[in-house]
Amino acid sequence: MGGNSQPHQEPRRVNNDPRARQQKGNQVRRDRRDVHGWVVLDKPIGMTSTQAVAVLKRLFNAKRAGHAGTLDPLASGGLPIALGEATKTVPFVMDGRKRYQFTVCWGEERDTDDIEGRVTATSDQRPTREAILALLPRFTGVIEQIPPRYSAIKVQGERAYDLARDGEVVELAPRPVEIHQLTLVDQPDNDRAVFEAECGKGTYVRALARDMGRILGTYGHICALRRTLVGPFGENDMIPLDQLEALCDRAASGEGSLADALLPVETALDDIPALAVTRADAARLHRGQAVLLRGRDAPTCSGTVYVTVAGRLLALAEVGNGEIIPKRVFNLTGLTASPGRNERN
């Protein structure tokens, strides 16, 4: 006798309701955690800043992440990455000083002003140590600097590096930048010189190498670059990617905590005053309401402050005209830095 010997199966039901798909997507988002704090990645050469943020967001399974100042793929060193509520403090880090150690290779200028670019000019001239030292004061203080053609500056809505890659001639206007200190660290041979620069927001070290090479009668480009300071974050705060991955593996097996890799959100606010308030005032500020400053114990400071209650970060606020006006309120529910991480080396 013929027939189907397979057991009977109900036809597969396909749920085409868009609400079901939305619920599934929301479930994925809910799986991400609230993580708040800073991780200062010692970024390896070859990784973009965007890739670094994506890696940390995955390692921490964090809902939100962003970086405080792009670091080129060619460069290594400090890339502060803000997780969760720390993203509200990114501008304070980006406005801080940066310190770089970089090596200039003489004799070639490149279209990107670093070793990855195409050679556009060459010279047999090589600068003496005395000539380099005599030049440094011209690049110290507030100077006018033309950014590299391959930069993230927008030109009529387009990134300069996108226009340059498309073969367009990009003319960028000079802009004032401040270089607090520029030092010749080493001159290992006639073709290379190692410098250290401490500078303000918007300074391009690649442009420094280009301009010094031109004035010295040779050409130059960056062949090595490391960032050692970003705002309040120095080398003691940096953690290499392999160490961070190992810490995440130990935390997943219950042998440690990811909180050990975090610096507190308020670390980014080292340069602004802290103001402690009572729990009653904290409740008002948390609701976005201003608080009057009363009595002889009222603070005399004015301007931007960060507000704490019982030692815990509450808000960024403006003090003036006898009141505290909240500007950004923090909700630090979730994973935060381990106790004691405020005590940094």
Image (cartoon, rainbow, N blue to C red):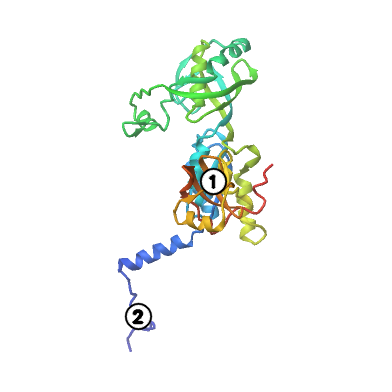
Q: Secondary structure at mark 1?
A: strand
Quick one: label 2, few (<14), some, or many (20+) residues within 10 Å? few
* Place of residue 187 in the rendered image (x, y in percent of width and height, measured from the top left): 64, 18
Q: Earlier in the sequence, mark 2 or mark 1?
A: 2
Up the image or down, 262 lies above or below 252; here it is above
Q: Is residue 269 visible?
A: yes
Up the image or down, 112 lies above or below 230; here it is above
- Taking the view exactly as shown, the residue that stands out farthest to the front is 295
Corner quadrant of residue 169: top left
Numbered disc in front, either 2 or 1: 1
**Tag shown at residue 276:** none
- Which residue, given by chain and number where applicable, does mark 2 sit on? 10
Cα distance in 3D space between marks 2 and 1: 62 Å
Q: Amino acid at mark 2?
A: Glu
**Tag shown at residue 306:** 1
Quarter of the image where the C terminus is located: top right
* Place of residue 265 in the rendered image (x, y in percent of width and height, measured from the top left): 56, 48
Q: Amino acid at mark 1?
A: Tyr
* Place of residue 87 in the rendered image (x, y in percent of width and height, measured from the top left): 49, 47
Up the image or down, 213 lies above or below 67; here it is above
* Place of residue 131 in the rendered image (x, y in percent of width and height, measured from the top left): 59, 10
Q: Nearer the viewer, residue 182 or 151?
A: 182
Tally of numbered tags: 2
Quarter of the image where the N terminus is located: bottom left
Residues at circles 2 and 1 in contact by the CB criterion of under 8 Å = no
- Looking at the image, which residue is at 56% across and 32% down? 98
Q: Secondary structure at mark 2?
A: loop
